Image (cartoon, rainbow, N blue to C red):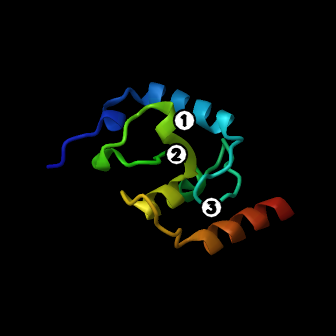
Amino acid sequence: MESKTAWQRMAPRRRAALAREIADRDGWICALCGLPIYEQETRRALRLSVDHIVPQSLGGTNEVENLRPAHCGCNSSRGNRIKRPIKRLDNLTAILERREAK
């Protein structure tokens, strides 16, 4: 079984508060795809998550300078690589465009 990272061991409420602080700092824009992040999103792929610029598995820290907002889908697609294209960008764009049209 894999051991938990410092981020995963952080209390859930503290993680959520820190994620909102990071999103506020960066204007609620996904750092990976550039599309907006909505706080009350119901679809998991579009929810707010925090991306480690340098992944913890590669020596990155939980310092705010190493954290940026991202959609859950973009973040999980990136994995633990420092640079990786987002595979589902077209999908996310279409979902957000439909939402804006309503």
**Element at badge 3?**
loop
Q: Image height check: is 16 above or below 34?
A: above
Percent coordinates x, y for residue 35 in the rendering: 69, 58
Are the residues flagged by discs 1 and 2 in contact, CB closer than 8 Å?
yes
Q: Alpha-carbon neighbours of circle 3 within 10 Å: few (<14), some, or many (≥20)?
A: some
Q: How far apart, in angstroms, are the residues tagged by discs 3 and 2? A: 13 Å
Camera-side residue: 30 or 63?
63
Q: 63 left or right of 19?
A: left
Percent coordinates x, y for residue 65 in the rendering: 51, 35
> Is residue 43 shown to the viewer in this render?
yes
Q: Nearer the viewer, mark 3 or mark 2?
A: 3
Kindly identify which residue carries mark 2. Answer: 49
The kind of residue tagged 1 is: Ala
Kindly identify which residue carries mark 1. Answer: 19
Q: Residue at x 29, y 48 (%)?
A: 57
The kind of residue tagged 3 is: Cys
Q: Nearer the viewer, mark 3 or mark 1?
A: 3
Q: Residue at x 52, y 73 (%)?
A: 87
Q: Image height check: is 38 above or below 63?
A: below
The kind of residue tagged 2 is: Ser
Q: Alpha-carbon neighbours of circle 2 within 10 Å: few (<14), some, or many (≥20)?
A: many
**Element at badge 2?**
strand
